[in-house]
């Protein structure tokens, strides 16, 4: 095997000191600073900025009004119009979740229940919001339209335990979803 040696080009004194690169960076920074003081910052009007930059003043200003349609936020479980669980514990969302943030323990539906034709429902359903990367794969893979990503971006907690949302919390966040639910369809 032949060894090929490549000689690096010799740098001039100005290039060795990086003065040209430092000066160009300083000029770019100075241009942005002057533009923000003149109120010409790109995107400042769209975010309702004070004019001194494109930074949103968070507690007072929120993204709620200008949230894009494609935004994916916090996952939540939903019920149908009659408060029935849509989730049938198929565990597809648990298997597809890249960071393994979803944990489901399936449970049986008693035979005396009026909706007993569905085989199971989740006994436990937890999503660890610290691990969740809001990718939307759980929503895409759900055959029963039971899990949705809401436009929620203000998720906070004072401990790790508070950031693990259980089934009750997920249904509370999700609410009701109107429309055809496959698991209640008589053709099944």
Image (cartoon, helix red, strand yellow):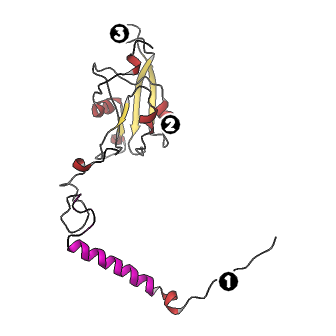
**Relative side of 178 to 126, left or right:** left
Please tell me whether mark 3 sits on a helix, a strand or a loop: loop
Please tell me whether mark 1 sits on a helix, a strand or a loop: loop
Compared to 51, does 122 lie above or below?
above
Q: Earlier in the sequence, mark 2 or mark 3?
A: 2
Q: Are marks 3 and 1 in contact (CB under 8 Å)?
A: no
Q: Position of residue 5 (x, y in %)?
A: 73, 79
The residue most toward the top is: 112
Gap in angstroms between the C-alphas marked 2 and 1:
50 Å
Gap in angstroms between the C-alphas marked 3 and 1:
81 Å
Give the numbered dot on residue 96: 2
Give the residue drawn at x 41%, y 35%. 139
Gap in angstroms between the C-alphas marked 2 and 3:
31 Å
Instruction: Nearest to the eye among marks 2 and 1: give it.
Output: 1
Observer able to see residue 36: yes
Q: Position of residue 45 (x, y in %)?
A: 21, 61
* Quadrant of the rendered image containing residue 6: bottom right
Q: Earlier in the sequence, mark 3 or mark 1?
A: 1
**Relative side of 127 to 5, left or right:** left
């Amino acid at each position: 095997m032949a060894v090929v040696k490549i000689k690096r080009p010799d740098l001039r004194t100005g290039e060795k000191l990086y003065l040209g690169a430092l000066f160009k960076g300083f000029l770019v920074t100075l241009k942005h600073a002057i533009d923000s003081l003149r109120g010409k910052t790109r995107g400042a009007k769209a975010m309702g900025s004070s004019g001194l930059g494109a930074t949103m003043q968070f507690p007072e200003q929120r993204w709620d009004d200008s949230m894009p349609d494609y935004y994916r936020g916090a996952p939540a479980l939903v019920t149908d119009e009659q408060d029935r669980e849509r989730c049938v514990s198929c565990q597809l969302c648990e298997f597809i979740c890249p960071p393994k943030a979803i944990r489901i323990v399936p449970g049986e539906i008693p035979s005396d229940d009026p909706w007993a034709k569905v085989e199971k429902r989740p006994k436990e359903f937890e999503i660890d919001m610290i691990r969740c990367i809001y990718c939307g794969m759980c929503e895409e893979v759900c055959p029963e339209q039971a899990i949705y990503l809401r436009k929620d971006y203000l998720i906070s907690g004072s401990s790790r335990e508070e950031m693990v949302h259980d089934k009750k919390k997920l249904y509370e966040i999700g609410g009701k979803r109107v429309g055809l639910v496959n698991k209640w369809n008589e053709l099944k």
